[in-house]
Image (cartoon, helix red, strand yellow):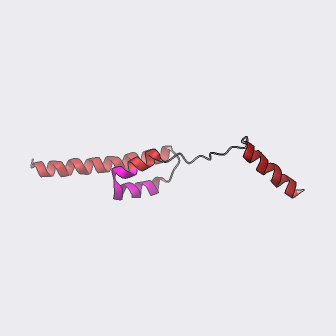
């Protein structure tokens, strides 16, 4: 096989692998799978790095934090 064709095939396989890995990791993190798939199609391994660095889609503020408790008490006092 021609070395150039082998190089192109390896590059395509690596690019396709990064697209699949980006979609799987985005799904695991509850992020937009379609969005990261399209991003990975155009940016390849860069999208894989981005999806690894982005935090998961879960909310970071819980009802037990002091600021959330304060906000909830202020809202309940406004209703009364």
Quick check: 19 left or right of 13? right
Residue 37 position, x and y percent, is 41, 54
Residue 34 position, x and y percent, is 45, 56
> Residue at left 84%, top 52%?
76
Residue 41 position, x and y percent, is 35, 57
Residue 78 position, x and y percent, is 85, 57
Q: What type of secondary structure mainly makes up the magenta span?
A: helix
> Residue at left 73%, top 40%?
64
Return the residue found at the far right: 80
Q: Which residues are magenta?
A: 34-47
Q: Is residue 44 magenta?
A: yes
Return the residue found at the far left: 2
Quick check: 76 left or right of 51? right
For the C terminus, the image quarter is bottom right
> Residue at left 62%, top 47%?
59
* Image quarter of residue 21: top left
Judge by depth and name the residue closer to the eye, 10 or 55.
55
């Amino acid at each position: 096989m021609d070395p150039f064709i082998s190089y192109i095939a390896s590059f395509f396989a690596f690019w396709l692998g990064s697209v699949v890995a980006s979609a799987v990791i985005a799904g695991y993190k509850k992020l937009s799978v379609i969005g990261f798939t399209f991003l990975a199609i155009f940016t390849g391994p860069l999208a894989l790095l981005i999806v690894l660095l982005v935090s998961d889609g879960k909310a970071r503020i819980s009802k037990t934090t002091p600021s959330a408790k304060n906000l909830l008490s202020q809202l309940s006092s406004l209703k009364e």
